Image (cartoon, grey):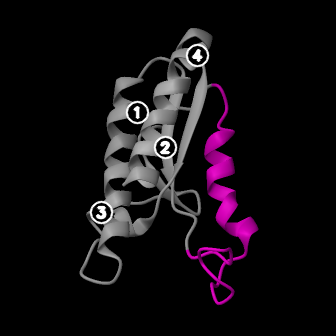
């Protein structure tokens, strides 16, 4: 919870005032489809799943709070990526896992996509 939720919350608290004054910003949280309440079932790593569900909830309420400010807030699930956390047996290369977060971070000025959880640029159910 300290990293997945509180770290993201504190960082948003620090940067949102500056984004508000600029009238623009993109906040992208790295989440997981394992934190989707709609997709959640029993299984391993309940603490991880709960922390990502909390991060997803924070994404939703922060996006709602910032509606109309030019600041878009979304979450991305990179999937199981070959990295330190995913290990060498993960099926996705880092570039594929990074695609959706980069896409969300670079949404154009006229974009309205906010408050969503995305995987491969597609919305996931909460």
Label 1 and label 3: CA atoms lie apart by 20 Å
Q: Which residues are magenta?
A: 80-109
Q: Secondary structure at mark 4?
A: helix
Asked whether, in this view, residue 45 is left or right of residue 112, the answer is left
Please determine whether, in this image, residue 57 is positioned above or below residue 108: below
Residue at 57%, 9% in the rendered image: 21
N-terminal of the two: label 3 or label 4?
4
Label 2 and label 4: CA atoms lie apart by 18 Å
Q: Secondary structure at mark 3?
A: helix
N-terminal of the two: label 3 or label 2?
3
Q: Which residue is mark 2?
A: 74
Residue at 37%, 50% in the rendered image: 56
Residue at 63%, 75% in the rendered image: 81
Looking at the picture, how far across and down is residue 106, in whole percent? 69, 39
Asked whether, in this view, residue 90 is left or right of residue 73, the answer is right
Which is more foreground, mark 1 or mark 3? Answer: 3
Label 2 and label 1: CA atoms lie apart by 7 Å
Label disc, if present, on residue 111 of the rendered structure: none
Q: Secondary structure at mark 2?
A: strand
Please determine whether, in this image, residue 16 is positioned above or below residue 40: above
Q: Residue furthest top?
A: 21
For label 3, count other residues whose C-alpha is less than 10 Å away and answer few (under 14), some (14-19) or many (20+). some
Is 45 magenta? The answer is no
Which is more foreground, mark 1 or mark 4? Answer: 4
């Amino acid at each position: 919870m300290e990293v997945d939720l509180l770290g993201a919350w504190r960082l948003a608290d620090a940067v949102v005032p500056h984004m508000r004054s600029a009238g623009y910003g993109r906040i992208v949280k790295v989440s997981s489809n394992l934190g989707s309440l709609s997709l959640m079932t029993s299984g391993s790593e309940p603490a991880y799943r709960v922390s990502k569900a909390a991060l997803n909830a924070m994404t939703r309420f922060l996006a709602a709070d910032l509606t109309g400010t030019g600041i878009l807030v979304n979450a991305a699930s990179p999937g199981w990526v070959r990295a330190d956390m995913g290990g060498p047996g993960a099926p996705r290369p880092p570039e594929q896992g990074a695609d959706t977060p980069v896409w969300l971070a670079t949404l154009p000025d006229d974009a309205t996509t906010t408050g969503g959880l995305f995987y491969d640029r597609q919305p996931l159910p909460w």
